[in-house]
Image (spheres, grey):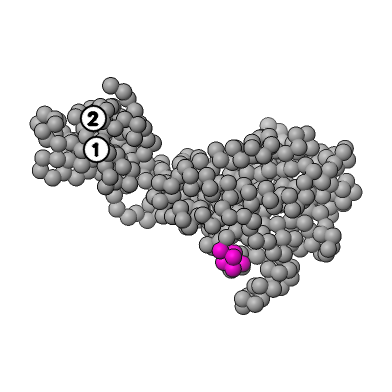
Amino acid sequence: METITISQAPEHVGETVKIGVWLTDKRSSGKIAFLQLRDGTGFFQGIIRKNDVDEAKFDSAKHDLHQETSFWVTGEIAEDKRSKFGYEIHIKDFEIVSKSEDYPIGNKEHGIEFLLDHRHLWLRSRKPWALMRIRSRVKLATMEFFDKHGFTQFDAPILTSSAPEGTTELFDVKYFDTDAYLSQSGQLYGEAGAMALGKIYTMGPTFRAEKSKTRRHMTEFWMIEPEMAWMHQDESLKIQEQYIAYLVQDLIDHCAQELEMVGRSVESLKPFTELPYPRITYKKAIEMLQEGGFDSKYGDDFGSPEETYLADQFNKPVFIMNYPRAIKAFYMPTDPEDDRQVICADLLAPEGYGEIIGGSERSYDYEYITNKLEENGLSKEDYGWYDDLRKFGSVPHSGFGMGLERFLSWITLQEHIRENIPFPRMINRLRP
């Protein structure tokens, strides 16, 4: 007899197998008990008929199996056309491994605050399970996409000596006898990698010392940040839209069940695989906002209402290109068509989820970057190595960053971005 997982059930129809499971729910009616089971790979139903087991075992199934009790089941896999999974197990025997009493998360509605306080257990429920599976698939698809496009994965440090953009939202830590900070971005180190390897991407945690009050602000999140030598903005935007479309299609192909569990239909995602995505300039965006009744003017940055309105005009992701210099980072080069602006672009997701990608060309002019470092009060001691990238054989290059949680919140239609964050990041519970 073979030991299998629930996900392998379709390959063993008609066979007697053994599976390690937890109980999520049960009901009984006379001489039959219906057990809802999970094992980490999936969910399905187990059926115990009184005639198939001895009386003591049937009585134990009715009285000893409580929510989240762990046990081994032995039985025959059968097709079940009534269920979405399509298979079930007809149980011939079971062996309790560990009992569970008074499990705090019942099969009823709970408030988000309660669930976040019990996240270590909530992960076992269907929705968080599906979210974690989707998250895992996106990370795998990310590696596949960039590998197919000739990128090298490049790991940036998490402990750094300075901020990538001179901001103050830094978590400071003591690094022996000197100050250090948790990384806000792998970008600057990624630029060094691109000068050595051509096309690279980083993928890892980043940190912001700001209060996590909305789905747009988090203290800890993951970023995917490609940097590409010999590349201008048009080429970069093509990579960006191809990447998003690839992720969406990959989820359609591999996570249809999980998407359904979180309330996202596959059909609603298909338009996001159609390329190219629309592109408008920042100036055009201001005109559209003014026509839509917003009190927007040139020089304003966009908040959630503005981003939502703009994206809703297209019903698919849209690039907003070339923002004013004053609201963007020091390393972005001047727009040759308007020296008030820089060559950059944000990708806004539809359905009210806002920016999911921010990117730009990176200036490769040594004098320009040196002056910008001085203008922004960034010391030569901290950023001299970044200056060196322009001093020794620099080339035109571009890059972008995608927030993993932002992307996942959009794809899975989640109001609470922290639902996408796996345990043990309980530090997020310390927010106001």
Pointer 1: what residue?
46
Q: Residue type at mark 1: give it.
A: Gly
Q: Where the N terminus falls, by quadrant? A: top left
Sort mark 1 into few (<14), some (14-19) or many (20+) by Cα contacts within 10 Å. Answer: many
Count of numbered tags: 2
Q: Is residue 312 magenta?
A: yes
Q: Which mark is residue 75?
A: 2
Q: Which mark is residue 377?
A: none
Depth check, front residue: 256 or 199: 256
Query: Relative to residue 291, is residue 204 depicted above or below?
Result: above
Residue at 31% from the left image edge and 30% from the top image edge: 12
- Determine the image quadrant of residue 338: bottom right
Q: Which residues are magenta?
A: 310-315
Q: Where does residue 11 sit, x and y in percent of width and height?
A: 35, 31
Depth check, front residue: 220 or 325: 325
Residue 254 in the figure: left or right of residue 393? left
Discs 2, 1 touching: Cβ within 8 Å:
yes
Residue at 48% from the left image edge and 57% from the top image edge: 268
Q: Where does residue 169 sit, x and y in percent of width and height?
A: 66, 51
Q: Is residue 111 magenta?
A: no
Query: Regarding mark 1 in the picture, which secondary structure is present there?
Result: strand
Residue 56 in the figure: left or right of residue 210? left
Residue at 32% from the left image edge and 55% from the top image edge: 109
Q: Where does residue 108 sit, x and y in percent of width and height?
A: 29, 53
